Structures are given as structure tokens and as C-alpha cells.
Image (tube, helix red, strand yellow):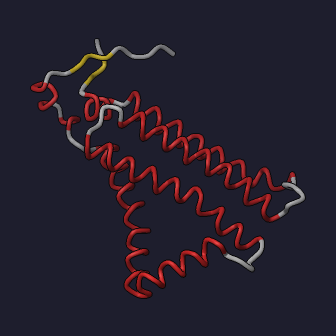
Amino acid sequence: MPQPAWRDLSAADHAALPESRLGGALALIFIAACGIVAVPVAGLVTLVVAAGPDGVFWTLGAFLTAEGLGPTGSVMRLTLVPQAALFLWAVVFIVVTAARLPAGPRIAALVFAFWATLSAGSQVAIQLAISPEGIAPSRIPLMLPFMLLDLVLAAAFWGYMHDGRRPNIYYRRRVPAG
């Protein structure tokens, strides 16, 4: 599929367009990213208030090592991998959006694709942690819909951030030519 031709906007043309402000689907994604960051930060603050700094380090260390829990501990750690990657994406998205970086759509889409890849890989790793002898064929149909959903989400986000009207006006100050 051919790439669309773009026309750069003057400062006056850019300011006149409503898409030059955070709004629509881009604003909803931004709000979601803020929520993705806020929840674990609030949990960490609550843990600091309840247990103090030493208690936080002890609690996080115990959770991350999960010694003596066997496969349960491995599964707990593996479930954190895509969550940490999604947190990273949210932080990156907030920064590139607040700064209006022209490379923001590409950076955010790449980090989101990284999350989708880690999410799929984490599902396989969890299955291997549960059954070290290998993934039973009956488990594959259970994982496949989630893996495909992650792929579709990453592709849709990539397409919106690269070809969408609002992201191109907001971050790159350009509109489709023609």
C-alpha cells in the first residue's frame, strides 16, 4: 500500500485546526495511559505509607524472588512482564504526547508493539512454567485468541498513530496532501 503524501502546516494553519489540540481518540488513549501509570504508582505509595520504605523493599523482594512457591512464583513473576511493558508504554506515551514530539507516534507504536510481543511470549512462558514437559496442544487454542488480540491492538495502534489525521496534525503538524 502506498504511503500517503503529506503537506506541512504553517503555524497559523496548525493553530486553526481543532485536531491540533489533544482530543478525540488520542485524548482517550492519553487518559488510559495516565490510568495505567496511576494505578501502580498509587499502589506503591499506599505500600510505602502502610509498610514504610523498608517494608516496600522487603515486600517487592519477596514477591520478585517468590522463593519456595515453585511454579506459582514463576507464574507470578511472568505475569509482571507484560504489565511492566504496558507501564513503560504508558509512561512513554504520556511523555511524547505532553512534549508533542514529532517522532512520538513512531516511538509509542514501537513500544506498544514491544508490549504485544512480550505479552504473547509471556503467555507461552507461563504455560512452560506450569508444564515444563511442554505446552499441551489443548492449551494452544486457549492462548491464541489473546495473542491475536494483542497483534490486532498493536496493528490498529500503529495504523492510527502513523496514518490518523489527529496524530499527524497533533505531533507532526501535517495533513494529507490533496
Q: Quadrant of the C terminus?
A: top left
Residue 14 in the image: state x and y as whole percent: 16, 28
Q: Nearer the viewer, residue 112 or 20?
A: 112
Residue 70 in the image: state x and y as whole percent: 77, 74
Q: Is residue 154 left or right of residue 21?
A: right
Q: Which residue appears at 61% of the width and 71% of the height?
A: 64
Q: Is residue 4 left or right of residue 14?
A: right
Across the whole image, how many numbered discs are drawn on residues? 0
Q: Is residue 78 above or below residue 137?
A: below
Q: Which residue appears at 26% of the width and 23% of the height?
A: 174
Considering every residue shown, the one lying at the far bottom of the view is: 50
Q: Is residue 24 above or below residue 39?
A: above
Q: Which residue appears at 31% of the width and 19% of the height?
A: 176
Residue 88 in the image: state x and y as whole percent: 46, 53
Q: Nearer the viewer, residue 11 or 99?
A: 99
Q: Nearer the viewer, residue 122 or 65?
A: 65
Q: Give the quarter of the image for residue 173.
A: top left
Q: Give the quarter of the image for residue 177.
A: top left
Q: Nearer the viewer, residue 47 or 117?
A: 47
Considering every residue shown, the one lying at the far left of the view is: 12
Q: Is residue 58 above or below residue 27?
A: below
Q: Which residue appears at 28% of the width and 29% of the height?
A: 172
Q: Is residue 112 above or below residue 55?
A: above
Considering every residue shown, the one lying at the far right of the view is: 133
Residue 27 in the image: state x and y as whole percent: 30, 48
Q: Give the quarter of the image for residue 58.
A: bottom right
